[in-house]
């Protein structure tokens, strides 16, 4: 099987699983339903995942799919700082609309206690590649501070996003994640913006 077909098969399974998790809840979704909705086989499912719990770590894949779409739709004239805020706003909107808060909470708890791979922190993800490019471009154009490295700024941004997501989960989604982030992300990131 080619790498592209492997990604497509794995992606079909992940997308079907998260759609079902959102529609009917994690507990009420079976592996058989995921296989049926994804149009794949039991062998394919177990080739990529040990079981349903293993799919919790695949949320980063869903996020990166969203970033791939956003990367293509981002207005070219937008400043680097505004691009960062745009990505945050669009991702948080998608999370509010498509990701069950109980699943997000479960994902964060597994990432805290896991001894293995921490998918959300994987620097090879499209998320981190896109952030590094935006920040590097922003520093090159003089829009973003050069007093911090690209890696330091990306880490700060990702940490702010995780803090907002974590708090939203703690509060059981009692407020709009997107609207709250729209107010506080610019405050969190003021130190990276060069005032002209």
Image (cartoon, grey):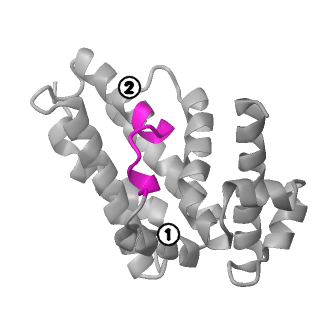
Residue at 60% from the left image edge and 66% from the top image edge: 54
Q: Residue furthest top?
A: 141
Image coordinates of residue 166 in percent, x first then y, are 37, 70
First reached walking from the N terminus: tag 2 or tag 1: 1
Residue at 37% from the left image edge and 73% from the top image edge: 113
Callout 2: helix, strand or loop?
helix
Q: Residue furthest left?
A: 147
Residue 149 lies in what quarter of the image?
Answer: top left
Callout 1: helix, strand or loop?
helix
Neighbours of disc 2 within 10 Å: few (<14), some (14-19), many (20+): some
- The circle drawn on residue 133 is 2
Instruction: Please tell me whether mark 2 or mark 1 is closer to you in this view.
Output: 1
Quadrant where the C terminus lies?
Answer: top left
Residue 129 lies in what quarter of the image?
Answer: top left
Q: Is residue 125 left or right of residue 10?
A: left
Residue at 43% from the left image edge and 26% from the top image edge: 78
Q: Is residue 17 left or right of residue 177?
A: right
Tell me which segment is drawn in magenta.
Answer: 117-129
Magenta includes 127? Answer: yes
14 to 196, vertically: above or below: below
Residue 133 lies in what quarter of the image?
Answer: top left
Nearer to me, 155 or 178: 155
Nearer to me, 136 or 119: 119
Q: Is residue 98 left or right of residue 30?
A: left
Image coordinates of residue 2 in percent, x first then y, are 76, 30
Residue beneath label 1, please? Answer: 107
């Amino acid at each position: 099987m080619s790498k592209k077909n492997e990604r497509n098969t794995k992606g079909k399974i992940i997308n079907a699983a998260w759609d079902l998790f959102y529609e009917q809840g994690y507990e009420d979704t079976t592996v058989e339903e995921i296989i049926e909705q994804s149009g794949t086989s039991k062998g394919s499912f177990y080739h990529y995942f040990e079981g349903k719990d293993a799919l919790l770590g695949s949320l980063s894949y869903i996020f990166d799919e969203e970033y791939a779409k956003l990367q293509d739709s981002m207005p070219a004239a937008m400043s680097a700082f505004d691009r960062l805020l745009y990505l945050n706003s669009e991702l948080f909107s998608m999370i509010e609309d498509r990701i069950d808060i109980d699943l997000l909470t479960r994902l964060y708890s597994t990432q805290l206690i896991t001894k293995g791979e921490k998918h959300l922190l994987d620097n090879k993800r499209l998320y981190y590649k896109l952030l590094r490019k935006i920040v590097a471009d922003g520093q090159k154009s003089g829009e973003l501070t050069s007093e911090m490295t690209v890696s330091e700024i990306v880490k700060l941004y990702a940490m702010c996003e995780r803090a907002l997501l974590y708090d939203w989960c703690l509060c059981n989604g009692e407020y709009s994640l997107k609207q709250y982030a729209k107010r506080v992300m610019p405050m969190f990131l003021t130190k990276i913006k060069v005032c002209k």
